[in-house]
Amino acid sequence: MSLANAAAVLHWLKRDRRDVAVGELSTAMGWPKSSSSRLLKDMARLGLLERDEATRRYRAGLLMLELGRQYSAGEPLLEAADAELQEITRQTGYSTGISMLDGTDIVVLRSRPGTHPLRVVTPPGTRGPAAANSTGRVLLARLPDDEIRRRFTPFPAPPRPNAPGDVADLMARVQKARVLGFDESNDESLAGLCGISVAIGEQSHGLGYAPYIAFSAAQLEPGERRRLAAMLVDMAARLSERFGDVRPAPPLQRRAHG
């Protein structure tokens, strides 16, 4: 089994695909059907994939799930942010979570459901477009402008009408996030889904993480949204002082929303 080919399969699966059949993989990759079948069987034997005997389709195996849990387990900054979000969920009843940036996507690392009837739940491992999520934009805001433009050229098709329509629109929203110290998305990646996010990180951790509060578009008035944004900005300030974030939220904006 070629390690490069196995990695190519995993990268292909992570792009909004839950499973794959031998013929689909062969067509997508341009590989012979026999080679595709052999590779999938080898990956299943090693625990990278598992096969549904009824459908004969392959999906990510238990080993990948275990590795995903280990990837973020025990990091002090992540655990501290998760503890703060647990308290925010307790106080407000809204769903919270933490995402990280991967290229032009965001990936959910932690997710906690709220207690409101209209609760928003995004399971860990879920991927989404960074340009159309507040979590993605606050993390992109920590990159140089040239790097953002490079990643989003060509610009992907917006998933919803409210999402950024081109690089210029994305850059304007990223710059706003830099000024405010937080970002808000509204019906951009999924219908009716809204979120407010901040970015946290350590000098040794690169871009870091994006803690967020998620809710339905029908749930919150502007005043309540400002209150939630202030809670996240204050949380980011506390964590940046504790862990030495080199790019904390702007102090003037923290006072303005406090």
Image (spheres, helix red, strand yellow):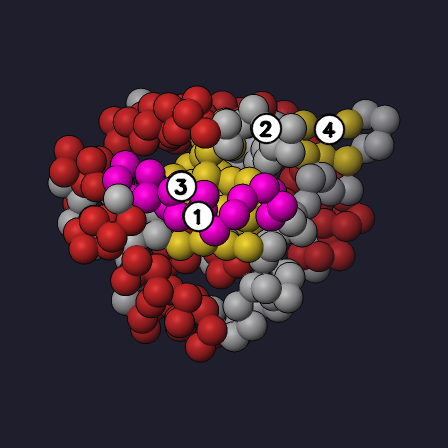
Q: Earlier in the sequence, mark 3 or mark 2?
A: 2
- The amino acid type of the residue labelled 2 equals His
Looking at the rendered image, the quarter that the C terminus falls into is top left
Q: Position of residue 63 (x, y in %)?
A: 53, 25
Q: Is residue 57 left or right of residue 231?
A: right
Q: Nearer the viewer, residue 81 or 176?
A: 176
Q: Nearer the viewer, residue 199 or 48?
A: 199
Q: Which residues are magenta?
A: 216-235
Q: Earlier in the sequence, mark 3 or mark 4?
A: 4
The residue beneath circle 3 is 228
The residue beneath circle 1 is 223
Q: Nearer the viewer, residue 243 or 87?
A: 87
Q: Nearer the viewer, mark 4 or mark 2?
A: 2
Instruction: Classify mark 3: helix, strand or loop.
Output: helix
Instruction: Classify mark 1: helix, strand or loop.
Output: helix
Q: Is residue 7 left or right of residue 35?
A: left
Q: Nearer the viewer, mark 2 or mark 1?
A: 1
Q: Main secondary structure of the magenta part?
A: helix
In the figure, residue 54 lies in which quadrant? Answer: top right
Question: How far separated are the C-alphas under marks 3 and 4?
Answer: 43 Å
Q: Earlier in the sequence, mark 1 or mark 3?
A: 1
Q: Is residue 227 visible?
A: yes
Establish if 164 lies above or below 126: below
Q: Which mark is residue 51?
A: 4
The residue beneath circle 2 is 116
Question: How far separated are the C-alphas under marks 1 and 4?
Answer: 50 Å
Instruction: Classify mark 2: helix, strand or loop.
Output: loop
Q: Nearer the viewer, mark 1 or mark 3?
A: 1
Q: Nearer the viewer, mark 1 or mark 4?
A: 1
Q: Residue at x 50, y 27 (%)?
A: 93
Q: Earlier in the sequence, mark 2 or mark 1?
A: 2
Q: Position of residue 42 (x, y in %)?
A: 63, 32
